[in-house]
Image: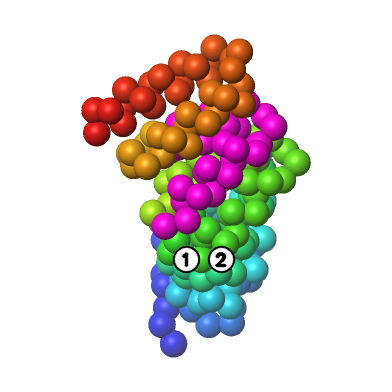
Amino acid sequence: MALVKARKTDGTKPVAVTEGDDAPAWLEDADPARRRQAAHALGERPDAVPALSARLTREDDPSVRETLLTALVRIGTAAAAEALVPLLASEDVGLRNGVIESLQQMPVTVVLPEVAPLLTVTDSDLRIFAVQLVGKLPHPDRLGLLAGVIDRDPHVNVCLSAVEALMECGDPAALPVVERLGARFPDDPFVAFSVDAARRLFAGA
C-alpha cells in the first residue's frame, strides 16, 4: 500500500497517511499538515468525493482548502462537480472563487450539466455566478445558454453579466443576441453602453 508521509510539525515522529481506508479519517485530524496529506492521497479516489466535499465546507486552513479542491479536480467526475456546484452559493468569497476556478479546470462535459440549471434559480446573485462560469466553459451550448439568459432573465444585472461573458467569448455570432437586450431594456443606460461596446468589439473582430 502506498504511503504519503506527513511532515514533522511538532517534534514528534512523522505520521504516515495511507491511501487506504484510513485516509478519509485523516481529513478530520487537528493537524492541518495531516489533513493536507490526506486530501492529496485521496485525489485519485472517486469514492472519496463525499469525504473531501464534506471537509471542504468546514475547512478554514487555506492550504488544506486548496488541496481539497485540487483533489476534487483530479478526480474530475460528475459526482465531484455535483459536490462543488452548491458551494457557488457560499458567503465565503475565497471558497466561492476557489470553487469557480476548480470547476473551470474540470471536464466541461461533467461541469455544464451541473451548472446550467443554476441559470434559472431564484437567487439572482447565484444566476450571475452561473453565467460567469458558463461563459468560461468551451462548450458548443454556451452561446445558446447565454442567449436564453439575455432573452428571458428578468434581472438586468444578470443579463449584463451574460453580455460580458459573450464578449469574452469573442464570437461575432453573439452580436444579434446582445442587441436583443437593447430592445428588452430600452431605457437602461448600462444596457445601451454594453450593447454599443459589443458592437464595437465584434465589428473589430
Residue furthest to the left in view is 204
Label disc, if present, on residue 109 of the rendered structure: 1
In-image side of 43 versus 130 (left or right): left
The amino acid pointed to by label 2 is Ala
Is residue 85 at all visible to an observer of this figure? yes
Q: Nearer the viewer, residue 143 or 184?
A: 184
Question: What is the number of the mark on residue 181?
Answer: none
Residue assigned mark 2: 80
- Give neighbour class at mark 1: few <14, some 14-19, many 20+ (Cα, 10 Å): few
Q: Quadrant of the N terminus?
A: bottom left
Vertical relation: 133 (above or below) 111: above
Q: Which residues are magenta?
A: 140-166
Q: Position of residue 98 (x, y in %)?
A: 50, 46
- Amino acid type, label 1: Thr
Q: What's the colour scheme?
A: rainbow
Where is residue 114 shown, x and y percent of the image? 60, 59
The residue lying furthest to the bottom in this view is 1
| Residue depicted at 41% across the width and 39% down the height | 174
In the image, residue 114 lies in the stretch drawn in magenta: no
**Which residue is at 54% across, 12% downward?**
189
Residue 93 quadrant: top right
